[in-house]
Amino acid sequence: MSNTSLSSAANATLHCLTGCAIGEITGLVIGTALGLTNTATIILAVGLAFVFGYSLSLLPLLKSGLVLKTALGVALAADTLSIATMEIVDNLVMLAIPGAMAEGLVNPIFWLALALALLAAFFAALPVNNYLIKRGLGHALVHEHHHQKG
């Protein structure tokens, strides 16, 4: 990866990770606090990760002047593969660490496992975002629309 490409991919990956982490943590906290099954908790966390991930791209696009339908299309095209990659890796790591999902919110194992899962998700999505950006896809689509009006 070139330095410019790596930098752009890292920024895009951090952007996606922020939205994913907000949604993932919110879903895991809610699911764990309510005593939901691992499956229900993961479904909630993944759903919220996509919602927050898309929102972080959607809001600046709307602010730049794009109409909702166009902005939503750009956000979906820009983030879906990155978020999906992160969510697959993140949840596989959480499930692979014995007891991580069952330990509860007050146990450091839960939080350490989640931190490890998010770190693994970042490194899994980095080459995905690099590939997309090099081809004018992914977050390259979002940046085409920043600071535009109309």
Image (cartoon, helix red, strand yellow):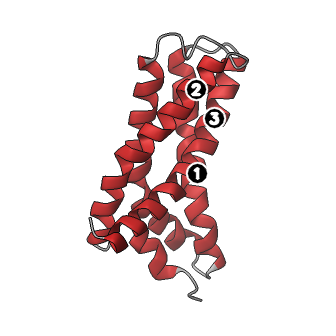
Residue at the image point whose x is 47% and y is 77% from the top:
143
How far across and how far down the image is residue 30, in percent? Answer: 70, 26
Instruction: Name the secondary structure under disc 1.
Output: helix
Q: Are marks 2 and 1 in contact (CB under 8 Å)?
A: no
Residue underneath mark 2 = 112
Marks 1 and 3: CB-CB under 8 Å?
no
Residue type at mark 1 is Thr
Q: Residue at x 43, y 26 (%)?
A: 93
Q: Nearer the viewer, residue 31 or 111?
A: 111
- Residue at the front extreme? 3
Where residue 61 sits, quadrant-wise, is bottom right
Q: Earlier in the sequence, mark 3 or mark 2?
A: 3
Q: Are marks 3 and 2 in contact (CB under 8 Å)?
A: no
Residue where numbered disc 1 is placed: 18
Residue 147 seen in the current view: yes
Q: Quadrant of residue 8?
A: bottom left
Tell me which amino acid carries mark 2: Leu
Cα gap from disc 3 to disc 2, whole angstroms:
12 Å
Decide if residue 84 is in sight here.
no
The vertical placement of 131 against 116, above or below, is below
Q: Is residue 112 left or right of residue 116?
A: right
Q: Residues within 10 Å of mark 3 (few under 14, many from 20)?
A: some
Q: Earlier in the sequence, mark 1 or mark 3?
A: 1
Provide residue 22's location: percent of width, then percent of height: 64, 44
Q: Is residue 13 left or right of residue 54?
A: left
Residue at the extreme bottom: 149
| Residue at the disc numbered 3 | 25
Q: Looking at numbered disc 3 in the image, what kind of residue is underneath it?
A: Ile
